[in-house]
Amino acid sequence: MKKLNAYFLIFALIFAFACKKDNHDHAHESELITTLRYTLVPASGGAPIVLTFKDLDGNGGNPPVITNGILAANTVYNGTLELMNESKTPSENITTEIQNESTAHQFFFVVTGASLTVRYADQDTKNKPLGLKTQVTTQQASAGKLQVVLRHEPNKDGANVANGIITNAGGETDIEVNFDVTVR
């Protein structure tokens, strides 16, 4: 009888742990972003400039492959961001998820050294900036960095966050990429 009770106790424990409720919120898990493409098309026409970041094995492992860009001076570009998870087959378009959850995301564009400005050209469902679409305006010849940062759950009402200043945004960084840019 003791043997039967021991087996019953073991079975009950296994059953209890196997049926434990999963309280994790899977809807807001951070997605793996292996690829970021920032396509800049001259507003007056011409060949697009495509800045790319590709890290197919994710953080760690092999270093990412980054394609930087050369922009024309005194030019306006219409920018479009595309984010993918290419570690899966077929690859997963993360851009659609960001659009569908627009109030929970915002891109930030931090420029150092290069004479260019980035303005938002799209909004979330509450008319706050999103950043999947932008307008980039270059000035005189220069060189520097363009950092693209995607924040999840930023405080879009924080001081200057709507103006693209990341300082008071808070939230969690989903991806951060630094491109070398040259304006000629």
Image: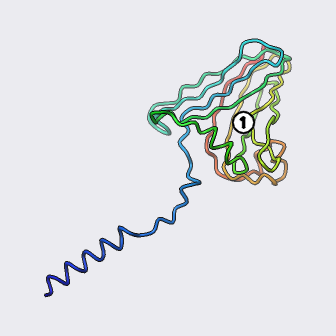
Residue 2 appears left or right of 114: left
Where is the C terminus found, in terms of image quarters?
top right
> Which residue is drawn at the image coordinates 49% and 38% (left, top)?
58
Q: Note whether 47 is above or below 120 in the view shown.
A: above
Using the image as rendered, state which of residue 133 and residue 148 is in the foreground: 133
> Which residue is drawn at the image coordinates 68% and 42% (left, top)?
99
Residue that label 1 marks:
132
Q: Can you tell which quarter of the image residue 130 is in?
A: top right
Q: Can you tell which quarter of the image residue 38 is in?
A: top right
Residue 3 appears left or right of 82: left
On the image, the x and y values in percent for residue 163 come to: 84, 43
> Which residue is drawn at the image coordinates 83% and 15% (left, top)?
44
Tag 1, which secondary structure? loop
On the image, the x and y values in percent for residue 114 come to: 78, 25
Where is the N terminus found, in terms of image quarters?
bottom left
> Which residue is drawn at the image coordinates 63% and 34% (left, top)?
177
On the image, the x and y values in percent for residue 113 come to: 77, 27
Q: Can you tell which quarter of the image residue 146 is in?
A: top right
